[in-house]
Amino acid sequence: MFWFVKEKKEAAIKAAVYGCLIILLGSFIIPETTKVVWPYLELLRYLAISALIVLEVTTIFTVFSAIKASLIKDTDPDVAILKSIERILGKGVISSLISFEARVWT
């Protein structure tokens, strides 16, 4: 799918975000009378919202388990949070963002 990109997961996430932004922009720009396929594409926003909710719930449970493990092992909670998120999502921009959000919530 992505031949010239090293991190396939990050490229897929960026492609999905760009697709959602294009659908949102198109829903504002395209007149209602000429939207033939667009109402079906606009339904994809519910899929994107549900994916975001799943991602947030995963972050909450990951933070909870990382803090619990760090308290048991007596290690630095920030390092435990970062390692647990990178284990699930891999290293990249998305894992850094979620790690930052997790630190904000703790």
Image (cartoon, rainbow, N blue to C red):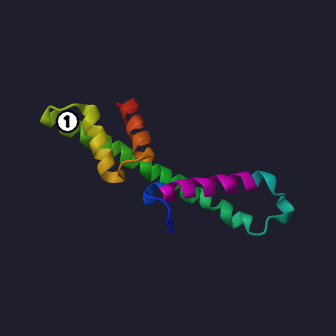
Q: Is residue 20 magenta?
A: yes
Q: Judge from the rendering whether residue 21 lies leftward or rightward of residue 2; answer left or right.
A: right
Q: Position of residue 59 (x, y in %)?
A: 37, 45
Q: Residue 53 in the image: x percent, y percent?
A: 47, 50
Q: Quadrant of the C terminus?
A: top left
Residue 54 image offset from top left, x and y in percent: 43, 52
Whether 69 is drawn above or below 3: the answer is above
Vertical relation: 33 (above or below) 87: below
> Which residues, given as a range, are shown in magenta?
11-26
Residue 58 % position (x, y): 37, 49
| Corner quadrant of residue 60 | top left
Q: Secondary structure at mark 1?
A: helix
Q: Residue at x 40, y 35 (%)?
A: 100
| Magenta stretch: helix, strand or loop mostly | helix
**Mark 1 surroundings: few (<14), some (14-19) or many (≥20) residues within 10 A:** some
The residue that appears at 72% across and 64% down in the rendered structure is 39
Residue lying at 46% horizontally and 54% vertically, measured from the top left? 10
- From the viewer's perspective, tell me whether residue 30 is left or right of residue 79: right
Residue where numbered disc 1 is placed: 70
The amino acid at mark 1 is: Ser
Can you tell which quarter of the image residue 102 is in? top left
Q: As rendered, which of 88 and 65 lies closer to the eye? A: 88
Side of 104 relative to 84 (left or right): right
